[in-house]
Amino acid sequence: MAQLQSLPVHQGFGETSRRDAWWFGPLVTLIGLSAFLIYANAIVLFVPGYFEIRANKADFFAPHNPAVAPYLAPFHAPLLYDAQSRHAWFQQARPGFWPSWAPFSSAMLILIFPAGFRLTCYYYRKAYYRAFWADPPACAVGEPRKSYWGENRLPLVFQNIHRYFMYAAVIFLFFLWWDALQAFWWPVVENGTVVSHRLGLGLGTIIMVVNCILLTGFTFGCNSVRHLTGGRLDCFSCPRNIAEPRLRHKFWHWSTLLNERHMEWAWASLISVGATDLYIRLCAMGTINDIRIF
Amino acid sequence: MAQAKFKIWRGTQDQGEFQEYTAEVGEGMVVLDCIHQIQATQAPDLACRWNCKAGKCGSCSAEINGRPRLMCMTRMDDERYITPGETTIVEPMHTFPLIRDLVTNVSWNYKINKMIPRFQPRQADAPDGTWRMSQEEVDRVQEFRKCIECFLCQDTCHVLRDHGKTEGEMFGGPRFMIRVASLEMHPLDTADRLPLVKDSLNIGLCNITKCCTEVCPEHIHITDNGIIPLKERVVDRFYDPIMWLFHKIFGDKQKAEPARTRTALPVIHEPAAKS
Protein backbone atom coordinates (compact mmCIF):
# COMPACT_ATOMS: atom_id res chain seq x y z
CA MET A 1 0.00 0.00 0.00
CA ALA A 2 1.38 3.34 -1.02
CA GLN A 3 1.12 6.52 1.04
CA LEU A 4 0.04 4.86 4.23
CA GLN A 5 -1.77 6.98 6.74
CA SER A 6 -3.57 6.54 10.03
CA LEU A 7 -7.33 6.24 10.33
CA PRO A 8 -8.88 9.72 10.21
CA VAL A 9 -9.97 10.46 13.77
CA HIS A 10 -12.00 13.67 13.27
CA GLN A 11 -10.65 15.40 16.34
CA GLY A 12 -10.96 18.96 15.07
CA PHE A 13 -14.06 21.12 15.41
CA GLY A 14 -16.57 20.25 12.71
CA GLU A 15 -14.43 17.48 11.23
CA THR A 16 -16.48 14.55 10.04
CA SER A 17 -17.05 12.15 7.18
CA ARG A 18 -20.74 13.06 7.27
CA ARG A 19 -22.13 14.56 4.10
CA ASP A 20 -25.61 15.40 5.24
CA ALA A 21 -26.52 18.86 6.55
CA TRP A 22 -25.65 17.97 10.16
CA TRP A 23 -25.20 21.66 10.94
CA PHE A 24 -28.78 22.55 10.04
CA GLY A 25 -30.48 21.38 13.25
CA PRO A 26 -28.02 23.10 15.62
CA LEU A 27 -28.17 26.26 13.49
CA VAL A 28 -31.97 26.42 13.68
CA THR A 29 -31.75 25.84 17.43
CA LEU A 30 -29.12 28.55 17.78
CA ILE A 31 -31.19 31.08 15.86
CA GLY A 32 -34.49 30.14 17.54
CA LEU A 33 -33.23 30.19 21.12
CA SER A 34 -31.16 33.33 20.53
CA ALA A 35 -34.18 35.15 19.08
CA PHE A 36 -36.24 34.22 22.13
CA LEU A 37 -33.49 35.24 24.57
CA ILE A 38 -33.01 38.60 22.82
CA TYR A 39 -36.77 39.26 22.81
CA ALA A 40 -37.20 38.27 26.47
CA ASN A 41 -34.27 40.35 27.67
CA ALA A 42 -35.29 43.36 25.60
CA ILE A 43 -38.83 43.24 26.99
CA VAL A 44 -37.75 42.83 30.60
CA LEU A 45 -34.92 45.38 30.54
CA PHE A 46 -36.10 48.03 28.13
CA VAL A 47 -39.90 47.96 27.87
CA PRO A 48 -41.52 48.90 31.18
CA GLY A 49 -45.27 48.36 31.27
CA TYR A 50 -47.45 47.47 28.27
CA PHE A 51 -48.30 44.09 29.77
CA GLU A 52 -52.03 44.80 29.48
CA ILE A 53 -54.22 46.88 27.18
CA ARG A 54 -55.14 50.18 28.81
CA ALA A 55 -57.38 53.03 27.65
CA ASN A 56 -54.53 55.50 27.17
CA LYS A 57 -52.18 53.65 24.86
CA ALA A 58 -49.69 56.52 24.60
CA ASP A 59 -48.85 56.65 28.31
CA PHE A 60 -49.19 53.26 29.96
CA PHE A 61 -48.42 54.49 33.46
CA ALA A 62 -50.71 57.55 33.31
CA PRO A 63 -52.88 57.82 36.44
CA HIS A 64 -56.46 56.54 36.16
CA ASN A 65 -55.64 54.55 33.05
CA PRO A 66 -57.91 51.51 33.35
CA ALA A 67 -57.44 48.26 31.44
CA VAL A 68 -59.91 47.93 28.58
CA ALA A 69 -59.18 44.24 28.00
CA PRO A 70 -58.62 41.48 30.56
CA TYR A 71 -55.39 40.15 29.03
CA LEU A 72 -52.08 39.88 30.82
CA ALA A 73 -48.82 39.34 28.96
CA PRO A 74 -47.36 35.97 30.07
CA PHE A 75 -43.91 37.40 30.87
CA HIS A 76 -45.63 39.30 33.68
CA ALA A 77 -47.71 36.41 35.00
CA PRO A 78 -48.12 36.38 37.92
CA LEU A 79 -48.06 40.18 38.15
CA LEU A 80 -46.70 40.90 41.60
CA TYR A 81 -46.41 44.69 41.59
CA ASP A 82 -48.34 47.35 39.73
CA ALA A 83 -50.02 50.53 40.92
CA GLN A 84 -53.32 50.05 39.09
CA SER A 85 -53.67 46.67 37.34
CA ARG A 86 -56.32 44.45 38.86
CA HIS A 87 -54.03 41.49 38.09
CA ALA A 88 -51.44 42.86 40.55
CA TRP A 89 -50.95 41.12 43.88
CA PHE A 90 -49.65 44.32 45.47
CA GLN A 91 -51.09 47.64 44.36
CA GLN A 92 -47.83 49.54 44.31
CA ALA A 93 -45.48 50.49 41.50
CA ARG A 94 -42.47 48.59 42.82
CA PRO A 95 -41.45 46.71 45.97
CA GLY A 96 -39.95 48.70 48.83
CA PHE A 97 -36.70 46.74 48.78
CA TRP A 98 -36.02 47.57 45.14
CA PRO A 99 -33.35 50.31 44.76
CA SER A 100 -34.93 53.49 43.44
CA TRP A 101 -32.18 54.02 40.87
CA ALA A 102 -32.58 50.56 39.32
CA PRO A 103 -35.01 49.94 36.50
CA PHE A 104 -37.89 47.74 37.58
CA SER A 105 -40.20 45.36 35.83
CA SER A 106 -42.42 42.94 37.69
CA ALA A 107 -41.21 40.27 35.26
CA MET A 108 -37.74 40.51 36.84
CA LEU A 109 -39.11 38.96 40.02
CA ILE A 110 -40.63 35.89 38.46
CA LEU A 111 -38.92 35.01 35.18
CA ILE A 112 -36.16 33.09 36.94
CA PHE A 113 -38.65 30.26 37.50
CA PRO A 114 -39.80 29.55 33.93
CA ALA A 115 -36.30 30.40 32.68
CA GLY A 116 -34.77 27.95 35.17
CA PHE A 117 -37.29 25.30 34.20
CA ARG A 118 -36.32 25.53 30.56
CA LEU A 119 -32.62 25.98 31.22
CA THR A 120 -32.43 22.72 33.20
CA CYS A 121 -34.94 20.82 31.02
CA TYR A 122 -33.51 17.62 29.58
CA TYR A 123 -34.59 18.55 26.06
CA TYR A 124 -33.19 22.09 26.18
CA ARG A 125 -29.96 20.78 27.63
CA LYS A 126 -29.53 18.62 24.56
CA ALA A 127 -30.44 21.55 22.33
CA TYR A 128 -28.05 24.11 23.80
CA TYR A 129 -25.19 21.72 24.53
CA ARG A 130 -25.25 20.99 20.82
CA ALA A 131 -26.09 24.40 19.38
CA PHE A 132 -24.35 26.80 21.79
CA TRP A 133 -21.56 24.71 23.26
CA ALA A 134 -20.89 22.30 20.37
CA ASP A 135 -20.43 19.41 22.77
CA PRO A 136 -21.05 17.71 20.35
CA PRO A 137 -22.25 19.96 17.51
CA ALA A 138 -23.86 16.87 15.96
CA CYS A 139 -23.42 13.11 16.20
CA ALA A 140 -20.02 11.87 15.00
CA VAL A 141 -18.79 15.41 14.34
CA GLY A 142 -15.56 16.72 15.89
CA GLU A 143 -15.69 19.07 18.88
CA PRO A 144 -13.82 22.29 19.64
CA ARG A 145 -12.58 21.24 23.11
CA LYS A 146 -10.87 18.15 24.42
CA SER A 147 -11.57 18.69 28.13
CA TYR A 148 -14.92 17.53 29.46
CA TRP A 149 -16.61 17.18 32.82
CA GLY A 150 -20.16 16.50 31.76
CA GLU A 151 -22.72 17.12 34.46
CA ASN A 152 -20.55 15.52 37.12
CA ARG A 153 -19.03 18.68 38.57
CA LEU A 154 -19.74 22.34 39.15
CA PRO A 155 -21.40 24.18 37.57
CA LEU A 156 -23.38 21.67 35.52
CA VAL A 157 -24.04 19.38 38.48
CA PHE A 158 -26.70 21.98 39.29
CA GLN A 159 -28.76 20.64 36.39
CA ASN A 160 -29.96 18.12 38.97
CA ILE A 161 -32.10 20.90 40.46
CA HIS A 162 -34.52 20.51 37.53
CA ARG A 163 -37.36 18.98 39.54
CA TYR A 164 -37.51 22.00 41.83
CA PHE A 165 -37.99 24.29 38.86
CA MET A 166 -40.63 21.82 37.69
CA TYR A 167 -42.52 22.29 40.97
CA ALA A 168 -42.42 26.05 40.36
CA ALA A 169 -43.55 25.57 36.76
CA VAL A 170 -46.60 23.59 37.90
CA ILE A 171 -47.52 26.42 40.30
CA PHE A 172 -47.04 28.93 37.49
CA LEU A 173 -49.44 26.91 35.34
CA PHE A 174 -52.19 27.64 37.85
CA PHE A 175 -51.50 31.37 37.57
CA LEU A 176 -51.43 31.24 33.78
CA TRP A 177 -54.67 29.27 33.56
CA TRP A 178 -56.27 31.68 36.00
CA ASP A 179 -55.18 34.59 33.78
CA ALA A 180 -56.54 32.76 30.72
CA LEU A 181 -59.90 32.27 32.45
CA GLN A 182 -59.95 35.91 33.46
CA ALA A 183 -59.42 36.79 29.80
CA PHE A 184 -63.08 35.81 29.28
CA TRP A 185 -64.22 38.42 31.84
CA TRP A 186 -64.12 41.80 30.14
CA PRO A 187 -64.19 45.16 31.88
CA VAL A 188 -66.99 47.56 30.93
CA VAL A 189 -65.44 51.04 30.94
CA GLU A 190 -67.61 54.16 31.13
CA ASN A 191 -66.12 57.66 31.40
CA GLY A 192 -62.68 56.31 32.16
CA THR A 193 -63.68 53.99 34.99
CA VAL A 194 -64.49 50.31 35.08
CA VAL A 195 -68.17 50.05 36.07
CA SER A 196 -68.68 46.28 35.70
CA HIS A 197 -67.46 43.14 33.97
CA ARG A 198 -69.15 40.85 31.49
CA LEU A 199 -68.41 37.67 29.56
CA GLY A 200 -66.50 38.29 26.36
CA LEU A 201 -64.10 36.78 23.88
CA GLY A 202 -61.28 38.30 21.91
CA LEU A 203 -58.53 36.92 19.73
CA GLY A 204 -56.21 37.50 22.70
CA THR A 205 -58.38 35.19 24.84
CA ILE A 206 -57.99 32.38 22.33
CA ILE A 207 -54.24 32.99 22.08
CA MET A 208 -53.89 32.90 25.88
CA VAL A 209 -55.84 29.64 26.16
CA VAL A 210 -53.78 27.99 23.40
CA ASN A 211 -50.63 29.19 25.16
CA CYS A 212 -51.79 27.57 28.40
CA ILE A 213 -52.58 24.28 26.66
CA LEU A 214 -49.10 24.19 25.10
CA LEU A 215 -47.42 25.09 28.39
CA THR A 216 -49.40 22.38 30.17
CA GLY A 217 -48.33 19.79 27.59
CA PHE A 218 -44.73 20.85 27.97
CA THR A 219 -44.77 20.90 31.78
CA PHE A 220 -46.50 17.56 32.34
CA GLY A 221 -44.32 15.83 29.75
CA CYS A 222 -41.27 16.84 31.77
CA ASN A 223 -38.91 13.97 32.54
CA SER A 224 -39.04 14.83 36.24
CA VAL A 225 -42.85 14.66 36.24
CA ARG A 226 -42.57 11.32 34.51
CA HIS A 227 -40.15 10.13 37.15
CA LEU A 228 -42.05 11.36 40.18
CA THR A 229 -45.49 10.22 38.99
CA GLY A 230 -44.38 6.64 38.52
CA GLY A 231 -41.06 6.24 36.76
CA ARG A 232 -39.25 5.93 40.07
CA LEU A 233 -41.15 2.74 40.88
CA ASP A 234 -39.83 -0.64 39.81
CA CYS A 235 -43.15 -2.30 40.41
CA PHE A 236 -46.43 -0.47 39.84
CA SER A 237 -48.58 -3.19 41.38
CA CYS A 238 -46.51 -3.74 44.52
CA PRO A 239 -47.07 -4.46 47.30
CA ARG A 240 -50.48 -5.92 46.60
CA ASN A 241 -49.43 -7.58 43.38
CA ILE A 242 -52.67 -6.92 41.59
CA ALA A 243 -52.57 -7.05 37.83
CA GLU A 244 -55.15 -4.29 37.28
CA PRO A 245 -53.85 -0.97 35.98
CA ARG A 246 -52.62 1.16 38.83
CA LEU A 247 -53.28 4.88 39.19
CA ARG A 248 -49.60 5.74 39.30
CA HIS A 249 -49.00 3.64 36.22
CA LYS A 250 -51.68 5.66 34.43
CA PHE A 251 -50.12 8.96 35.49
CA TRP A 252 -46.74 7.71 34.36
CA HIS A 253 -48.21 6.51 31.07
CA TRP A 254 -49.91 9.85 30.36
CA SER A 255 -46.75 11.74 31.16
CA THR A 256 -44.82 9.36 28.91
CA LEU A 257 -47.20 10.08 26.02
CA LEU A 258 -46.47 13.80 26.40
CA ASN A 259 -42.77 13.14 26.95
CA GLU A 260 -42.45 11.32 23.62
CA ARG A 261 -43.06 14.70 21.94
CA HIS A 262 -41.23 16.78 24.56
CA MET A 263 -39.15 18.58 21.95
CA GLU A 264 -42.23 19.59 19.96
CA TRP A 265 -44.03 20.74 23.12
CA ALA A 266 -40.92 22.65 24.16
CA TRP A 267 -40.71 24.60 20.92
CA ALA A 268 -44.45 25.09 20.51
CA SER A 269 -44.79 26.44 24.04
CA LEU A 270 -41.69 28.62 23.73
CA ILE A 271 -42.99 30.17 20.53
CA SER A 272 -46.49 30.54 21.96
CA VAL A 273 -45.24 32.29 25.10
CA GLY A 274 -43.23 34.74 23.02
CA ALA A 275 -46.04 35.24 20.50
CA THR A 276 -48.72 35.71 23.19
CA ASP A 277 -46.54 38.23 24.97
CA LEU A 278 -45.77 40.07 21.75
CA TYR A 279 -49.44 40.12 20.66
CA ILE A 280 -50.63 41.64 23.94
CA ARG A 281 -47.83 44.19 23.98
CA LEU A 282 -48.45 45.27 20.40
CA CYS A 283 -52.16 45.67 21.24
CA ALA A 284 -51.20 47.58 24.40
CA MET A 285 -48.98 49.94 22.42
CA GLY A 286 -51.68 50.50 19.84
CA THR A 287 -49.55 49.05 17.02
CA ILE A 288 -52.27 46.53 16.24
CA ASN A 289 -55.84 46.23 17.44
CA ASP A 290 -57.20 43.19 19.22
CA ILE A 291 -60.11 41.49 17.46
CA ARG A 292 -63.12 41.36 19.77
CA ILE A 293 -65.35 38.42 18.86
CA PHE A 294 -68.17 39.18 21.32
CA MET B 1 -27.63 -2.61 -12.73
CA ALA B 2 -26.18 0.64 -11.55
CA GLN B 3 -22.61 0.94 -10.44
CA ALA B 4 -21.69 2.42 -7.08
CA LYS B 5 -18.26 3.60 -6.00
CA PHE B 6 -16.89 2.91 -2.56
CA LYS B 7 -13.96 4.13 -0.52
CA ILE B 8 -13.22 1.58 2.16
CA TRP B 9 -10.63 1.84 4.92
CA ARG B 10 -7.97 -0.84 4.43
CA GLY B 11 -5.33 -1.46 7.05
CA THR B 12 -4.87 -0.98 10.74
CA GLN B 13 -5.19 1.97 13.11
CA ASP B 14 -1.72 3.29 12.32
CA GLN B 15 -1.15 2.06 8.83
CA GLY B 16 -3.68 2.04 6.09
CA GLU B 17 -5.52 4.02 3.47
CA PHE B 18 -8.85 4.39 1.79
CA GLN B 19 -9.06 2.20 -1.29
CA GLU B 20 -11.60 2.63 -4.03
CA TYR B 21 -13.86 -0.16 -5.24
CA THR B 22 -16.87 -0.47 -7.48
CA ALA B 23 -19.94 -2.62 -6.95
CA GLU B 24 -22.93 -3.50 -9.10
CA VAL B 25 -26.02 -2.41 -7.19
CA GLY B 26 -29.33 -4.17 -7.72
CA GLU B 27 -32.72 -3.48 -6.25
CA GLY B 28 -32.98 -3.93 -2.48
CA MET B 29 -29.23 -4.25 -1.94
CA VAL B 30 -27.68 -3.03 1.28
CA VAL B 31 -24.15 -1.80 1.96
CA LEU B 32 -23.15 -5.20 3.36
CA ASP B 33 -24.16 -6.84 0.05
CA CYS B 34 -21.78 -4.49 -1.73
CA ILE B 35 -19.00 -5.25 0.75
CA HIS B 36 -19.54 -8.98 0.11
CA GLN B 37 -19.48 -8.39 -3.62
CA ILE B 38 -16.23 -6.44 -3.29
CA GLN B 39 -14.82 -9.29 -1.18
CA ALA B 40 -15.84 -11.81 -3.83
CA THR B 41 -14.59 -9.91 -6.86
CA GLN B 42 -11.90 -7.41 -5.89
CA ALA B 43 -10.61 -7.70 -2.33
CA PRO B 44 -10.79 -11.24 -0.92
CA ASP B 45 -8.75 -10.15 2.10
CA LEU B 46 -11.14 -7.34 3.12
CA ALA B 47 -11.93 -7.96 6.80
CA CYS B 48 -15.45 -7.35 8.03
CA ARG B 49 -17.66 -8.90 10.70
CA TRP B 50 -21.12 -10.09 9.84
CA ASN B 51 -23.53 -12.83 10.81
CA CYS B 52 -27.26 -12.55 10.33
CA LYS B 53 -27.69 -9.86 7.66
CA ALA B 54 -31.00 -9.07 9.33
CA GLY B 55 -30.13 -6.40 11.87
CA LYS B 56 -30.29 -8.78 14.79
CA CYS B 57 -26.75 -9.94 15.51
CA GLY B 58 -25.11 -6.52 15.82
CA SER B 59 -21.92 -7.58 14.06
CA CYS B 60 -21.62 -5.37 10.98
CA SER B 61 -21.41 -1.99 12.71
CA ALA B 62 -19.46 0.57 10.70
CA GLU B 63 -19.53 4.22 9.74
CA ILE B 64 -21.14 4.84 6.40
CA ASN B 65 -20.53 8.34 5.08
CA GLY B 66 -19.64 9.27 8.63
CA ARG B 67 -22.85 7.92 10.16
CA PRO B 68 -22.63 4.98 12.59
CA ARG B 69 -24.84 2.31 11.00
CA LEU B 70 -25.35 -1.41 10.62
CA MET B 71 -24.15 -2.18 7.10
CA CYS B 72 -26.88 -4.79 6.69
CA MET B 73 -29.63 -2.29 7.51
CA THR B 74 -28.47 0.51 5.23
CA ARG B 75 -30.05 0.19 1.83
CA MET B 76 -28.15 1.54 -1.16
CA ASP B 77 -31.27 3.49 -2.20
CA ASP B 78 -31.69 5.17 1.18
CA GLU B 79 -30.76 8.75 0.38
CA ARG B 80 -30.51 9.71 4.03
CA TYR B 81 -27.22 7.81 4.14
CA ILE B 82 -26.16 7.13 0.56
CA THR B 83 -25.86 9.98 -1.92
CA PRO B 84 -26.67 8.71 -5.43
CA GLY B 85 -23.79 9.12 -7.85
CA GLU B 86 -21.26 9.88 -5.13
CA THR B 87 -18.59 7.63 -3.66
CA THR B 88 -19.74 6.01 -0.44
CA ILE B 89 -17.17 6.06 2.37
CA VAL B 90 -17.12 3.03 4.65
CA GLU B 91 -15.01 3.24 7.80
CA PRO B 92 -14.70 1.10 10.90
CA MET B 93 -16.12 2.39 14.19
CA HIS B 94 -13.83 5.17 15.41
CA THR B 95 -14.23 4.73 19.15
CA PHE B 96 -12.72 1.25 19.42
CA PRO B 97 -9.21 0.07 18.56
CA LEU B 98 -9.02 -1.08 14.98
CA ILE B 99 -7.88 -4.64 14.32
CA ARG B 100 -8.00 -4.48 10.54
CA ASP B 101 -10.11 -2.92 7.78
CA LEU B 102 -13.64 -2.75 9.16
CA VAL B 103 -13.09 -4.94 12.24
CA THR B 104 -12.65 -3.30 15.62
CA ASN B 105 -11.80 -4.67 19.05
CA VAL B 106 -14.89 -4.07 21.19
CA SER B 107 -13.70 -6.06 24.22
CA TRP B 108 -13.67 -2.92 26.42
CA ASN B 109 -17.46 -3.19 26.43
CA TYR B 110 -17.36 -6.69 27.87
CA LYS B 111 -15.20 -5.48 30.73
CA ILE B 112 -17.75 -2.80 31.57
CA ASN B 113 -20.50 -5.39 31.38
CA LYS B 114 -18.80 -7.48 34.05
CA MET B 115 -18.97 -4.56 36.48
CA ILE B 116 -22.76 -4.71 36.57
CA PRO B 117 -24.27 -7.02 39.22
CA ARG B 118 -26.46 -9.64 37.63
CA PHE B 119 -30.24 -10.01 38.01
CA GLN B 120 -31.11 -10.85 41.61
CA PRO B 121 -34.79 -11.72 41.90
CA ARG B 122 -36.75 -11.44 45.11
CA GLN B 123 -37.92 -14.53 46.95
CA ALA B 124 -40.27 -16.57 44.76
CA ASP B 125 -43.94 -15.55 44.93
CA ALA B 126 -45.41 -19.02 44.68
CA PRO B 127 -44.52 -22.30 46.39
CA ASP B 128 -43.45 -23.79 43.08
CA GLY B 129 -40.61 -21.26 42.89
CA THR B 130 -42.18 -18.99 40.27
CA TRP B 131 -42.98 -15.29 40.25
CA ARG B 132 -45.97 -13.23 39.20
CA MET B 133 -45.80 -9.91 37.43
CA SER B 134 -48.12 -8.09 35.09
CA GLN B 135 -47.31 -6.98 31.57
CA GLU B 136 -47.38 -3.30 32.52
CA GLU B 137 -44.52 -3.96 34.93
CA VAL B 138 -42.21 -5.37 32.31
CA ASP B 139 -43.08 -3.18 29.33
CA ARG B 140 -40.26 -0.83 30.19
CA VAL B 141 -37.55 -3.45 30.53
CA GLN B 142 -38.69 -5.36 27.47
CA GLU B 143 -37.72 -2.36 25.34
CA PHE B 144 -34.20 -2.54 26.74
CA ARG B 145 -34.00 -6.27 26.05
CA LYS B 146 -34.12 -5.50 22.34
CA CYS B 147 -30.49 -4.38 22.47
CA ILE B 148 -28.35 -6.38 20.03
CA GLU B 149 -25.03 -5.05 21.35
CA CYS B 150 -23.92 -3.58 18.06
CA PHE B 151 -22.16 -0.87 20.14
CA LEU B 152 -23.11 1.84 17.67
CA CYS B 153 -24.35 3.90 20.62
CA GLN B 154 -20.98 3.50 22.32
CA ASP B 155 -19.29 4.45 19.05
CA THR B 156 -21.26 7.65 18.57
CA CYS B 157 -21.30 8.72 22.23
CA HIS B 158 -19.06 11.79 22.27
CA VAL B 159 -18.00 11.11 25.87
CA LEU B 160 -16.23 7.97 24.65
CA ARG B 161 -15.54 9.00 21.07
CA ASP B 162 -14.23 12.54 21.47
CA HIS B 163 -13.29 12.72 25.14
CA GLY B 164 -11.91 9.20 25.48
CA LYS B 165 -13.52 8.50 28.87
CA THR B 166 -12.72 4.81 28.71
CA GLU B 167 -10.46 4.69 31.75
CA GLY B 168 -9.88 6.67 34.94
CA GLU B 169 -12.98 8.83 35.31
CA MET B 170 -14.57 6.60 32.72
CA PHE B 171 -18.08 6.56 31.34
CA GLY B 172 -19.93 3.25 31.04
CA GLY B 173 -21.63 4.38 27.85
CA PRO B 174 -25.24 4.21 26.68
CA ARG B 175 -25.28 0.45 26.14
CA PHE B 176 -24.53 -0.21 29.78
CA MET B 177 -26.84 2.48 31.08
CA ILE B 178 -29.53 0.53 29.23
CA ARG B 179 -28.38 -2.74 30.76
CA VAL B 180 -28.44 -1.21 34.24
CA ALA B 181 -31.87 0.30 33.53
CA SER B 182 -33.20 -3.08 32.42
CA LEU B 183 -32.15 -4.54 35.77
CA GLU B 184 -32.93 -1.58 38.03
CA MET B 185 -36.46 -1.16 36.66
CA HIS B 186 -37.20 -4.85 36.76
CA PRO B 187 -40.11 -5.50 39.14
CA LEU B 188 -38.49 -8.64 40.58
CA ASP B 189 -34.94 -7.43 40.98
CA THR B 190 -33.62 -6.56 44.42
CA ALA B 191 -30.04 -5.43 43.80
CA ASP B 192 -29.05 -1.78 44.13
CA ARG B 193 -26.91 -0.52 41.28
CA LEU B 194 -27.36 3.23 41.76
CA PRO B 195 -24.01 3.81 43.52
CA LEU B 196 -22.36 1.95 40.64
CA VAL B 197 -24.21 4.06 38.08
CA LYS B 198 -23.20 7.29 39.80
CA ASP B 199 -19.63 6.59 40.88
CA SER B 200 -18.24 3.90 38.59
CA LEU B 201 -20.22 4.17 35.37
CA ASN B 202 -20.34 7.97 35.90
CA ILE B 203 -23.79 8.72 34.57
CA GLY B 204 -23.09 12.38 35.33
CA LEU B 205 -20.73 12.46 32.35
CA CYS B 206 -23.66 11.98 30.00
CA ASN B 207 -24.94 15.34 28.81
CA ILE B 208 -27.99 13.75 27.16
CA THR B 209 -27.29 14.96 23.65
CA LYS B 210 -29.12 11.87 22.40
CA CYS B 211 -26.77 10.67 19.66
CA CYS B 212 -27.09 7.17 21.10
CA THR B 213 -30.85 7.29 20.55
CA GLU B 214 -30.36 8.57 17.01
CA VAL B 215 -28.13 5.69 15.93
CA CYS B 216 -29.83 2.78 17.72
CA PRO B 217 -30.88 0.27 15.03
CA GLU B 218 -33.41 -1.25 17.43
CA HIS B 219 -34.95 2.19 18.02
CA ILE B 220 -34.55 1.92 21.78
CA HIS B 221 -35.24 5.29 23.40
CA ILE B 222 -31.89 5.06 25.13
CA THR B 223 -31.84 8.58 26.53
CA ASP B 224 -35.48 9.21 27.38
CA ASN B 225 -36.37 5.76 28.69
CA GLY B 226 -33.04 4.59 30.06
CA ILE B 227 -30.48 7.26 30.89
CA ILE B 228 -32.78 10.11 32.00
CA PRO B 229 -34.86 7.86 34.33
CA LEU B 230 -31.58 6.60 35.82
CA LYS B 231 -30.35 10.17 36.21
CA GLU B 232 -33.60 11.00 38.01
CA ARG B 233 -33.10 8.03 40.32
CA VAL B 234 -29.57 9.22 41.05
CA VAL B 235 -31.01 12.66 41.86
CA ASP B 236 -33.51 10.99 44.22
CA ARG B 237 -30.75 9.19 46.06
CA PHE B 238 -27.82 11.59 46.02
CA TYR B 239 -28.90 15.16 45.25
CA ASP B 240 -32.51 15.86 46.22
CA PRO B 241 -32.71 16.80 49.94
CA ILE B 242 -36.48 16.32 50.14
CA MET B 243 -36.36 12.84 48.64
CA TRP B 244 -33.42 12.01 50.87
CA LEU B 245 -35.51 12.96 53.90
CA PHE B 246 -38.49 11.05 52.50
CA HIS B 247 -36.42 7.87 52.17
CA LYS B 248 -34.95 8.36 55.64
CA ILE B 249 -38.39 8.57 57.20
CA PHE B 250 -40.35 6.09 55.12
CA GLY B 251 -37.56 3.87 53.76
CA ASP B 252 -37.24 2.63 50.22
CA LYS B 253 -39.94 0.02 50.42
CA GLN B 254 -40.12 -1.01 46.83
CA LYS B 255 -36.79 -2.80 46.79
CA ALA B 256 -36.56 -6.25 48.34
CA GLU B 257 -40.29 -6.50 48.96
CA PRO B 258 -40.63 -9.86 50.68
CA ALA B 259 -43.05 -12.18 48.96
CA ARG B 260 -44.86 -13.10 52.17
CA THR B 261 -46.41 -9.63 52.49
CA ARG B 262 -48.18 -10.08 49.22
CA THR B 263 -51.80 -11.08 48.95
CA ALA B 264 -52.87 -14.44 47.60
CA LEU B 265 -51.44 -14.95 44.16
CA PRO B 266 -53.61 -15.64 41.15
CA VAL B 267 -52.86 -18.93 39.45
CA ILE B 268 -51.98 -18.08 35.88
CA HIS B 269 -52.54 -21.55 34.47
CA GLU B 270 -52.71 -25.05 35.78
CA PRO B 271 -50.18 -27.41 34.27
CA ALA B 272 -51.94 -29.92 32.04
CA ALA B 273 -52.21 -33.33 33.65
CA LYS B 274 -50.17 -35.96 31.90
CA SER B 275 -52.23 -38.82 30.67
Image (cartoon, rainbow, N blue to C red):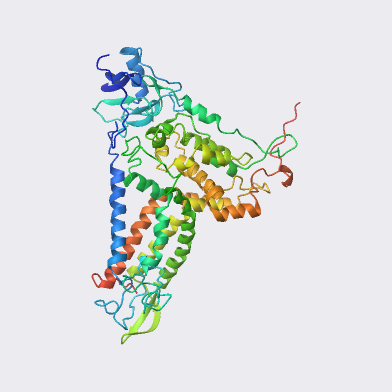
- In the rendered view of the protein, which quadrant contains the C terminus of chain B? top right
- Where residue B89 sits: x, y (%)? 29, 26
Does residue A79 appear anywhere in the picture? Answer: yes
Q: Position of residue A258 (x, y in %)?
A: 46, 51
A13 left or right of B249? Answer: left
Q: Is residue A172 above or below residue B87?
A: below
Q: Residue at x 35, y 41 (%)?
A: A135
Residue A270, x across and y down, in percent: 36, 57
| Vertical placement of residue B257 versus A172, above or below | above
Quarter where residue A129 is shown: top left
The quadrant in which residue A47 appears is bottom left
Q: Nearer the viewer, residue B243 or B32?
A: B243
A6 and B120: which one is in front? Answer: A6
Q: Position of residue B57 (x, y in %)?
A: 47, 25
Q: Nearer the viewer, residue A201 or A253?
A: A253
Q: Which residue appears at 56% of the width and 33% of the height?
A: B116
Q: Is residue A151 left or right of residue B2?
A: right
